[in-house]
Image (tube, helix red, strand yellow):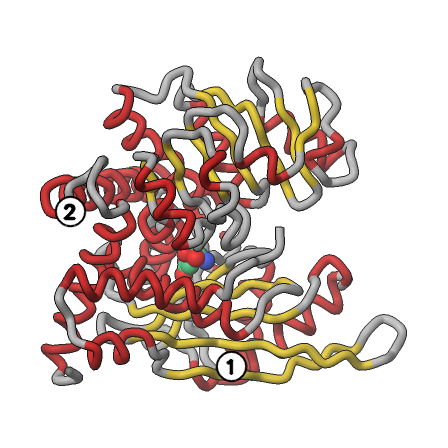
Amino acid sequence: MTSRLDPYEEAKKQLQVTVSILGLSKEVYEMLATPERIVQVKVPVMMRDGSIKVFIGWRVQHNSALGPYKGGVRYSPETNLSEVMALATWMTWKNSLAGLPYGGAKGGIQVDPFQLNQFELMQLSKNYFSAIAPFVGVDLDIPAPDVNTNPQTMAWYIDAYQMKMGSKELGVVTGKPLELGGLETRIYSTGLGVASVTQAAAKKLWGGIEGKTVAVQGFGNVGFYTAKFLKEMGAKIVAISDIKGGIYSSRGLDPEAVKEYITKKGSGFVIDYPDVERRITNEELLTTDVDILVPAAVENVITAENAPKVKAKLIVEGANGPTAPEAEQVLVKRQVVIVPDILANSGGVVMSHIEWVNNRMGGWITEEEAKNKLMQKMADNFNAVWNFWENKLGGMGGAYSMRSAAQAIAVDKVVRAMKLRGWI
Ligand code: GLU
């Protein structure tokens, strides 16, 4: 599952479409495409054999017109500056679309975290966060988990920040463990959000989600919880995969049983799950005969080559940037509905905002309240995008994807804030 297209080029191509829909100038495009600040840091780790390894990390702050920067940090051997720039750009649109008072940012370290033990990971995390500490803060830039980072990573970040800056502020990162001001709901909020918009889209397309077949690519936090909630909503999960490959069963799979097996008995990979009809590759999963496809792994997996073979009528982007722009054109012509990443996977950052507000108020919110707020917001945001798409851009059968509608709403708001500030 390696990226075939430069993600920042992908983000810029999407922005060009939005700029033409909104009738904005070339100057405004340049203002929107260029990140405000790029921080690159050295992250040394003393390895278990006493040697020192140097990793490179980034924090890209794309746009702050709407408020402090906000976005996750990922650890991956494939992460590079271009990817982090694209992801930071998408965070600006995601936060704007979700109606949050945040700009967009993203961080990353080029590292294979599975090669490090806990002590090495702790050093990596603390050294990275100390290095970027002067550039982040509760009102400045608020990091959170992303691919291969989790509440434990956020706990190390908080500690490094407090040691370095002499602060006791908890709201400087979100997605924290409960003991450090996190919320129970944050761990499953992205998946719940993806499932909620899938349900809303299925209602528009077929009148409901019950019995609809689903293939989910990626079985990390987003993929797993999406599959779990979709099953609870009545959909049938027939295919699941992770980095090593996937499994298929026409009778339906139980995501919780698969998770339990692979973490307790198997090697940690989906492919080992015994009770299946057949094993499939990631490429096969994308073109499996299903109603709904949820790419919840990495960028650019749906390409111009495999897009004509995709059989799903509905694609819901759990991952950021899984559909290449050329693939999207093919799918739009075939009237496949794509619920775009900046809408579909915004549940994580919406919950991050609830956590941040909660930390700053020194208050508490119940799991039920937080969950209801999230589901309500996802439904409202889905409807806003769907209505704009249908009423202004021709909807299904028209020339534009749902992404164009989502981006138009998001970019328009950022542009208005930039105008008010006198930036453009
Ligand atoms: N990493 C998540 C995303 O891409 C969450 C970001 C956040 O909570 O700040 O949306």
Residue 144 is marked as none
Residue 132 is marked as 1
Q: Position of residue 240 (x, y in %)?
A: 59, 32
Q: Spatial distance from mark 1 to mark 2, Cα to Cα?
A: 41 Å
Tell whether 421 sits left or right of 162.
left
Q: Earlier in the sequence, mark 1 or mark 2?
A: 1
Q: Residue at x 20, y 45 (%)?
A: 385
Numbered disc total: 2
Q: Is residue 12 above or below residue 298?
A: below
Viewer-proximal residue among 376 and 359? 376
* Residue 109 in which image quadrant: bottom right
Q: Do we see residue 407 in this rendering?
A: yes
Q: Is residue 256 above or below residue 395?
A: above
Q: Quadrant of the C terminus?
A: bottom left
Q: What element does badge 1 sit on?
A: helix
Residue linked to disc 2 = 393
Extreme-right residue of the structure: 49
Q: Position of residue 319 (x, y in %)?
A: 47, 49
Find out whether the residues at labels 1 and 2 contact each other: C-beta distance under 8 Å.
no
The residue type indicated by label 2 comes to Leu
Q: Residue at x 57, y 13 (%)?
A: 251
Q: Is residue 347 above or below residue 247?
A: below
Tell whether 372 sits left or right of 300.
left
Q: Residue at x 23, y 61 (%)?
A: 18
Tell whether 151 sits left or right of 243.
left
Q: What element does badge 2 sit on?
A: loop
Viewer-proximal residue among 373 and 344? 344
Q: Do we see residue 347 in this rendering?
A: no
Q: Residue at x 25, y 57 (%)?
A: 407
The residue type indicated by label 1 comes to Ile
Viewer-proximal residue among 170 and 92? 92
